[in-house]
Image (cartoon, helix red, strand yellow):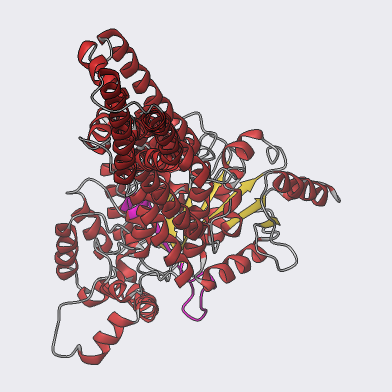
Amino acid sequence: MTAVTDQDPTEHTDHTEHTENTVDRTGHGAEEAERAGLDPEPSAGKGAAGAAREDEPHARVKDVRVKDAEASSRRGGDTGRGNAAGGRGDRDGGRGDRDEGSSGGASAGAADSGDGEGAWGDGLIARRVDENGGAEPYAVLPSRPPASSAALMPLAYDGNLRSRLDALRELVGLSRTRLDSGTLAEAGRVLDEASARRRLSGQHTVVAIAGATGSGKSQLFNTLAGVTISETGVRRPTTAAPIACSWSDGAASLLDRLGIPGRLRRRPLQHPDSESPLRGLVLIDLPDHDSAAVQHREQVDRILALVDAVVWVVDPEKYADALIHERYLRPMAGHAEVTFVVLNQVDRLPGEAAEQVLDDLRRLLDEDGIALGEYGEPGATVLALSALTGEGIGELRETLGQFVAERQAPARRIAADVDAAARHLRPVYVTGQRTGLSEEARDEFADRLADAVGATAAGEAAERAWLRHANRACGTPWLRLWRWYHDRRDPVTGRLPSRAQADEEATARQRVEHAVRTVSDRASAGLPAPWAQAMREAAVRGAQGLPEALDELAVRTGLPPGRPPRPGWWPVAVLAQAAMTLLQVVGGLWLLGQIIGFVPPNLGVPVLLMLAGIVGGPLIEWSCRLAARGPARRYGHEAERLLREAAAGCGRARVLDPLAAELLRYREVREQYARVTGAGAATR
């Protein structure tokens, strides 16, 4: 005997207390409490039996059915009166039958009149079952989940899936400041749903039956349940709200997550002598996905995102409908392992037409990218059946039973959701190009900054200054005297006109900006658009104040005040020049003494002395100039090197280091993305 019961854990606690009071007022308190799924009042005689009943929900169900039969036999004389009372309760408030037409059921129906809804909450379904002769009894389940449901084990993910979820959570955290919330919305939803599903029962599998108008999904739902639960008929749409049917206890929290109210929750109780092959299954009959009512389609989309698996019901007329393929099957191709595709109404196809339609359906699914679970490979299950005649129902029931018994559907669904989120995020993490900032790009940036700060010109100026100092130190006194006079007469300030200085500063600023723009483009090459934009923004932030910093650096790192350092051979050159000058002076005085008669005439010696001084001085100066070129060049190169290093250090601290930090952050998210996809390393 099959019975369908209501399951309403969403009602208030006072409803449970009201039910318990109603049970106490009847003459069958203990039996009615157990039939309602409630524990009787605690007593000293409960002992181990009561504890066993709390720990064994399925054993309790069998006890309920046995006591149900005994109670029904004892209440035989009250059945008619109970049916009449139940009928009045249905006509007055749409509350339906409460308890097999018994006086206790009538009392429960009266008790429910206070909260405005009965066990069914759907007068049409209740009347249809009642019109069939009242063969299917209905009992009120507790308003709260049974105590035994607390003992249900929560869902456990394996190590690989946990690692992928942790990586996805880390990936979202690292990307929040780089990607907009819309891009990360799907990944966030997957994390939330995975966390919510993990806290719920791992012993149940929630399977939704979805399909188009007239595909027969409600009829298939009723056939699997073994009793008419969901309304069927020619009126469209027939199913206005999702209806749930659970084959075991403890599914209340799962149905709460789906937002299915208690009045739309059913429970088929199988014969106590046989174990249900669908134990642990929670079946959901959805509204039509192509319904004209917008709220129906919204409910379908919402629940499809939460269930563990989906049974898509198609018929020979609409199995190739573009709506179901483009809107649902193709986007959900990665969920093939938790997808069933059922070709219903094959009894309408003559001869081999059913096989032909089934083959064409498989072809369409293959074009959608859905892997088919054939030859033992993981993928979608495709079946042909007739919910009207029962053809193929046994195969579907057996397949669902094996599917539920594995208890892998929730984890497979979450893994498929993670795969879908990874595919959605791939364009913002992977481009297939090599990324990074090469040493060549770094050196080029340093050279551009050195040019902007005038490192080459500074080195050349330092070289000229050293040469000039060497010439002055090693030159002839007469030349040095003339240069001193020239400098006094026309002093060189070393300052450029204000106009030229302003133009030079503007040119230097443009060079700095061009250098920053070039290096940011090099660094962002090959990166996805959001990360390339982040690189450019980091470069722009670093470039703010960079020209001014380089100017200060040039002043601080430029030529030191005073004279350049003197080499060791300069004093020797100075003494030699002094000796040549002394020879010229001695020779000149000697000739002068001979002219005035103060010294005896002898032109040879003084002339030779004067010629030696006159020729020796320039010769020594020329020799010193040749000797000074090497040290002057080294001095200029050293000044240029110091300025280049200083400019490169400033550019590295302000621009290159932020760019490197952004690249490092991108590599971190790439590594996390590789973990999300299950790869060992990020693919380029």
The picture quadrant where one finds residue 98 is: bottom left
Does the magenta-highlighted stretch encompass residue 264?
A: yes
Q: Residue furthest top?
A: 499
Classify residue 579 as left or right of residue 62: left
Image x and y of residue 443, in percent: 47, 41
Q: Is 87 or 246 nearer to us in this picture?
A: 246
Q: Nearer the viewer, residue 436 or 607?
A: 607
Which residue range is magenta in the image?
257-280
Q: How many marks?
A: 0
Which of 323 and 81 lies nearest the eye of the viewer? 323
**Image quadrant in which you'd find residue 659:** top left
Q: Taking 431 as reference, is 149 above or below it?
A: below
Residue 333 within the magenta-colored segment of the rendering: no
Comparing 426 with 617, the one in front is 617
Give the side of residue 650 with respect to residue 362, left or right: left
**At 26% from the left edge and 35% from the top edge, which residue is drawn?**
553
Residue 58 image point, x, y percent: 39, 78
Name the spot of residue 542 as percent of width and height, x first: 31, 35
- Above or below, 260 relative to 518: below
Estimate the x, y position of residue 399 in percent, counting from the top left.
62, 66
